[in-house]
Amino acid sequence: MRLHLKETLMNSILIWIRSAFYQDYNTGSIYSHVDSDEPLRGPAQEFDFGSDDDEEPSIPVTSKNKRSKQAERPKKIIPTGSDDSSSDEDEDDEPVTMANMAARSRKLEARAAAEEELDIAEMQAREAAELEDEDDMDDEIEEDGDMDTEQFHLPTAAEREEEKANGGPDVHTVQRRMRECVRVLSKFKKRAEKGRSRAEYVSQVVADIASYYGYNEFLTEKLFQLFSVTEAIEFFEANEVSRPVTIRTNTLRTRRRDLAQALVNRGVNLEPIGKWTNVGLQVFESNVPIGATPEYLAGHYMLQAASSFLPVIALSPQPNERVLDMASAPGGKTTHMAALMQNTGIIFANELNKARTKSLTANVHRLGCRNVVVCSYDGREFPKVMGGFDRVLLDAPCSGTGVISKDPSVKINKSERDFTLLSHLQKQLILCAIDSITPESKTGGYLVYSTCSVTVDENEAVVDYALKKRPNVKLVDTGLEFGREGFTSYRGKNFNPSVKLTRRFYPHVHNMDGFFVAKFKVEKRSKSAIAASKKDEADEPIEVDEEFIQNGDTADVAFNDDEDRPYLEEAKRKRMKAKGLRPPPRSKPVETQA
Ligand SMILES: C[S@@+](CC[C@H](N)C(=O)[O-])C[C@H]1O[C@@H](n2cnc3c(N)ncnc32)[C@H](O)[C@@H]1O
């Protein structure tokens, strides 16, 4: 009996999580089709940028992922059908119509709010109960000397080597070991095998997660470190499941209720996403390809992940403003901004990758945005190209660790070097974005920095760097109603306390892609602040790489000349070669003293 109970409890970590996600996974979601439409996403620039999903039109849809059972996921922002446990179930199964749209929307909002509270309370109660149960059981086990505990043995380094040499463990061994390691790590002192360190358990569970979910060990560890042990497993599980299919109503062409009615008439089962957006719709099921309906072709909506509404909501561009979208293809956020600005003012939609400007331009046309100018510069050339913006959106190129469910290649193709280079590029871009904003703006003076990545290097570290380098900027509230606070300290690094104002979004928490949003207010630069930041930049060079130096004459970003010379030379050689010129021979590396 006790053994059975214990097994049930031990299984709870993985089986519970799996069951919460499994139905969507098995039935396959409409979204997976979205992901396969690569040509429109365009080739990545130097990296796979974990590109956004904002625009992928040809989506064959016959998916039946309606009303999935995700019953126990906490604090969902995008509700799933299984959340509808109220007595209104029958009514909710009715299609959305013009007549019931507003009422349903209000009801959904009220329900989401109530559920959120319930979810939190339930979760806390469950966690407390689980802990209590485990404690009781552990105590009993410890008294009686339980067999199963004795049976689990953390392999030694030599045993792990041997296991590897024999082709690795089978999936059941890995599963069980993960469960056991999670159990031990959540109460290490009490449960660890004598003489074994925490690091050994962590190393084992990281290796097992990597092999079970198919990641490289470097990335597994990087992501694992972001969470508590049990939450880490939830995160990895969530990456195995597609996120809900969502669309954004283009208010330049239609209203949400009219769009919903038109799609309902075509056999699409949908609902408003939630109270935090008045333009989003979640598609549960469709008899027609959502990316090829007449409404889609007429630009009434954009296929867009819910998370990518967030930076635009945070930036909140106003009519008649001058706005820069520094890294904009395929234009999900540009076209959203155009709609909020009611086609007034001007948006410069910049994109380094020329091939990607095609889909950007196509979307701008399809959605009827008349205030957008598409351009193609390296973002680091701003503000030399042009400045004086009221608001800037920097939806930065990133590793895509927030969108692994859409692009599983991220699991294996990201190395330590990629993160170093990316965060370096992001730091350069953010300074250029800040410098492109006019502090004199009467209506704005804001920058939103966002990524679809969850790593600290690409998010809080970049934001903190910008705060250090530009004393004339400060973080402000994003205005977003949900999302976890950014880290103010992480693995021995302390960030500016205001980094707390940034927001993190996770697949396992919010049922949306992993995302990060920070909002800055740019103020006038005092002379002393300029001098201080210049000195600071000279003192503290940032690493560079030739792949990122597209143009030696980049904006106001500091380099250490000696360190950067070989990179700059290499970039120059590349440019000359591209123009058909013969590059000069490479100069000898400068000897550095030990
Ligand atoms: C995350 S995606 C942008 C998605 C876009 N904001 C949207 O909502 O549709 C990042 C984009 O930055 C572009 N990019 C990469 N390096 C850049 C640079 N140095 N300057 C400008 N754009 C760059 C990539 O080609 C990619 O299209």
Image: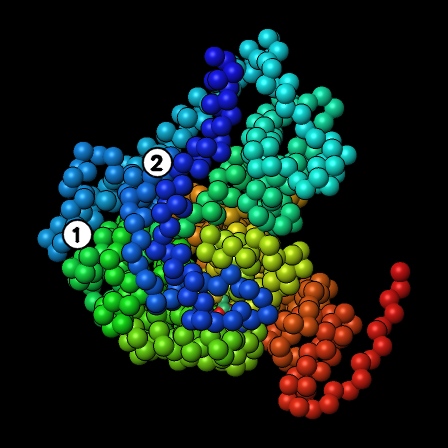
Asked whether residue 86 is in view, the answer is: yes
**Where residue 566 appears, x then y in whole percent?**
76, 74
Task: Say what secondary structure mark 1 lies in.
Answer: loop
**Where residue 113 appears, x then y in whole percent?**
29, 40
Position above or below: 280 against 13: below
Query: Distance between the Cα atoms at labels 2 and 1?
Result: 23 Å
Task: Say what secondary structure mark 2 lies in.
Answer: loop
Position above or below: 537 against 285: below
Q: Is residue 413 left or right of residue 278?
A: right
**Where residue 99 appears, x then y in whole percent?**
10, 53
Task: Determine the residue located farthest toward the bottom in the rendered image.
Answer: 581
Query: Which quadrant would residue 346 be assigned to in this image?
Result: bottom left
Asked whether residue 435 is in view, the answer is: no
Residue type at mark 1: give it. Answer: Val
Q: Which residue is mark 1?
A: 96
The residue positioned 34% from the left and 55% from the top of the image is 30
Residue type at mark 2: give it. Answer: Ala
Q: Which residue is mark 2?
A: 71
**Going from the N terminus, do you reach mark 2 or mark 1 first?**
2
The residue positioned 64% from the left and 85% from the top of the image is 578
Q: Residues within 10 Å of mark 2 (few under 14, many from 20)?
A: some
The residue positioned 35% from the left and 73% from the top of the image is 363
Q: How does the figure colour the protein chain or chains?
A: rainbow
Task: Determine the residue located farthest toward the left in the rendered image.
Answer: 99
**Where residue 432 appears, x then y in whole percent?**
55, 71
Q: Is residue 450 left or right of residue 585?
A: left
